Amino acid sequence: MPVIEIRDLVKEYNKERVLKGISFSVKKGEIFGYLGPNGAGKTTTIRILSGLLKKNAGECLVLGQDINQVDRSFYYHLGVVFEENNLYRRLSGFQNLRLFADMYGIGIERVNLLLDRFGLKNNARKQVKNYSKGMKQRLLICRALLHEPELLILDEPTGGLDPASVDIIHQAIREYKANKGTVFISTHYLEEADELCDRVAFINHGEIIEIDYPQVLKERYGNPVLEVRVRNRGQKILKELLSLLTDDDEIYTGDKFPVIRLSLVREGAGERLDKIRARTEVLGIHSREANLRDVFITLTGRGIDV
């Protein structure tokens, strides 16, 4: 039985459909990525999954139960981190976790274990208002994992964080999965999804436009390229180089050294490279495999960070 099963889910605000009959399922033990630009419907979906919003139509089953009919005991099996910070700022990190531990009937050992695991032990007695953004986010994830839930739902868990905090959070997600947990993660960082997720769904304008394994999507829609860095010899040479390219190739001139991206999907990349070498000095060449950003742009015609 899927951990999450959504069928023809509709949500409207002021007669405007934000979710337009979406359907997908999440398997037990997988990390499922939910990808799309801001305003696509990601957070609305998460609020419905966690019981904060009522759907207008369709089905939403979480852990085998209709989310609109669950009782209080259901939330012992669910951990959620929303995009908004909802910690108690005047309490310490320890007090924030202790408060929820008491609600769940969890001993202090679990609180101390998580504070240590997430690098918060030395600041556990400080007020949360004095924490950095990364520390606050790690504390939120500590709180979501406190009662060892079956399902972890994360809404943009690493947005704007420092690399050290991102690494700690990513490792915690992997460990949670290794212990047979299921993760539903919403993010617009496609590199993060590529690194973590078993499967991903793309949502755009309230509609699911594709669901599959990241590698399958990259092979189906991606555009592997050969990146050629050249010496800038002036606009005349750049115009000549541009005339050698196909519609699938690109040239970037913002850097001191322009970069030409030759599509490896289009035949004749080697011949185009030889022509470039004949007209200007090539400083470096390397290949770049297709990524999920390429997939998204192909599917929607726009960048993800909008």
Image: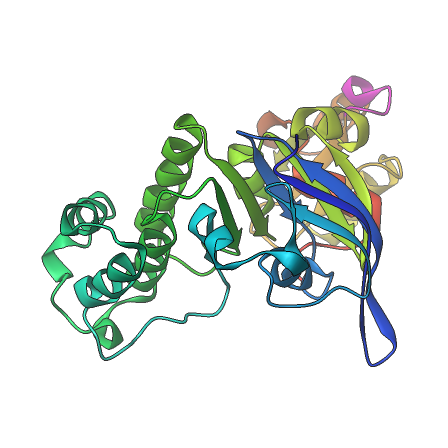
Quarter occupied by residue 136: bottom left
Q: Is 192 contained in the magenta span? A: no
Dominant secondary-structure state across the stretch colored magenta: loop
Instruction: Give the image location of residue 274, x and y in percent.
Output: 75, 21
Q: Give whichever of 102, 46 is nearer the camera.
A: 102
Q: Is 269 contained in the magenta span? A: yes
Magenta stretch: give its range: 264-271
The image quadrant where one finds the N terminus is top right
Q: Residue at x 30, y 48 (%)?
A: 164
Instruction: Give the image location of residue 54, x and y in percent.
Output: 70, 67
> Left or right of 244: which side holds 164?
left
Instruction: Give the image location of residue 146, x and y in percent.
Output: 31, 50
The image quadrant where one finds the C terminus is bottom right
Whether residue 237 is visible here, answered yes or no, is no
Instruction: Give the image location of residue 297, x and y in percent.
Output: 77, 47
Quarter occupied by residue 99: bottom left
Q: Give whichever of 241, 34 is nearer the camera.
A: 34
> Left or right of 272: which side holds 234?
left
- Asked which colour scheme the image uses, the reply is rainbow
Q: Give whichever of 131, 229 is nearer the camera.
A: 131
Q: Residue at x 39, y 35 (%)?
A: 176
Quarter occupied by residue 226: top right
Whether residue 134 is visible here, answered yes or no, is yes
Residue 219, placed above or below residue 73: above
Q: How many marks?
A: 0
